[in-house]
Image: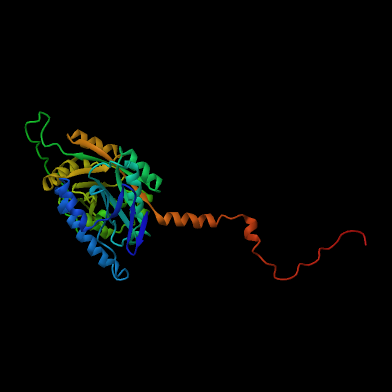
Amino acid sequence: MEVASGREVEFSSSSLQIEPLKAAHLPWLQARDQSVLLPQLQTLLLQGWLGQLESLAPGLMNRRQPLTMVASEGQSLLTFLVMRPHNRQGSCWRMDVQQLTPPVRSSQGDLHRNLFKQALLQPQARSCSWVVRCSINDDTQLSVLRELGFQPIRTLCRWRPSQADESGTMPRQRPAQPEGINWVALDRRTVPLLWPLDQASTTNLQRQIVDRHPMDLLDQAGAGSGVVLVSETSGDVAIAGLVRQQRSDNAQVLELLREPAWDARLHQALPWVLTSAAAQNPQATFACNSEDTQLKALLHNNGWTRLDDELLLGRSLWRRQNSLRRLEATRPLEAMLGRLQPQQPPLPTPSLGDR
């Protein structure tokens, strides 16, 4: 059963309940020994209330606060899904799923299917594009997302730096700063320099779905982020950068951006930069394009450990609407000619026969 009342869309069955996060859900965490998540859900609940205030004046401000959906059986929280704008103009939203406990009376596929469906029905972001991250090994979630119209747009692999040398006893020596290489913070001055690398690191389909602008990169600044600059005759040029992935969980993931052509200066610059970033944010892992063989070889040769692979999937409402317009424009020629009306009665056809 679905209940649509103003700003809420809920789903309930005999065993599975999906609804927006409410204050009544918080005591369930303590009863199930999940109190470690209590501060996170309290923050999400407060942000959800602020988001309701934003929705009262949609013409005055874009929604910036997240919306959280929870799936439960009885008084047991199974999963929660956080939706938040993926860009500043709110044209693309991101979904992050965090599993608490597996369902007992429902299948995992039914849980994901109904949870994602209800998220897509929320009126706050009904006319937006969507992105979601998923483990490349989670066949159930991937199948549900593909069923709902999501398509893969990028595959990323995560790495962790090694804190010891090959013997495992001595800390790895920090590389020296290469000559002519500068590592600067990500701010309003350096964002225009990094922006071309951000665009070059993504596919055309991904750029259409996420609909980002240069200032959106400022939302990915933080500990460990920055830009690798080299001085040339035309001025400072960015050859690589690190930005924080926008995630709703507590994982600190720094994503490496670079231009498609491999710059030989990266052989010396990246080991120093990545070690410096890891020192600034010891809890961070690092992500790069799974198809970037040169970068993966560099990380492997410097003793880094590959953790896992994540798939970024996207769903674009704009592309669906545009395809419908293209279909309308491919009608048969007879149908288009039939709309032409003669401006005067047709003239008689002359006869060439004997008179």
Q: Quadrant of residue 25?
A: bottom left
Q: Quadrant of residue 53?
A: bottom left
In the rendered view, would you say 15 is above or below 129?
Answer: above
154, 19: nearer the viewer: 19
- Give percent across and percent down for residue 246: 24, 52
- Give percent across and percent down for residue 267: 21, 39
In the rendered view, would you say 167 is above or below 55?
Answer: above
The quadrant of the rendering that contains the C terminus is bottom right
Q: Residue at x 26, y 60 (%)?
A: 215
**Seen in the image, is 3 located left or right of residue 219?**
right
- Can you see residue 55? yes
Q: Residue at x 15, y 53 (%)?
A: 39
**Seen in the image, is 179 located left or right of residue 325?**
left
**Seen in the image, is 155 located left or right of residue 336?**
left
39, 164: nearer the viewer: 39
Q: Residue at x 40, y 45 (%)?
A: 147
Residue farthest to the front?
Answer: 14
- Can you see residue 265? no
Q: Quadrant of residue 288?
A: top left
- Give percent across and percent down for residue 80: 25, 50
- Give percent across and percent down for residue 166: 12, 30
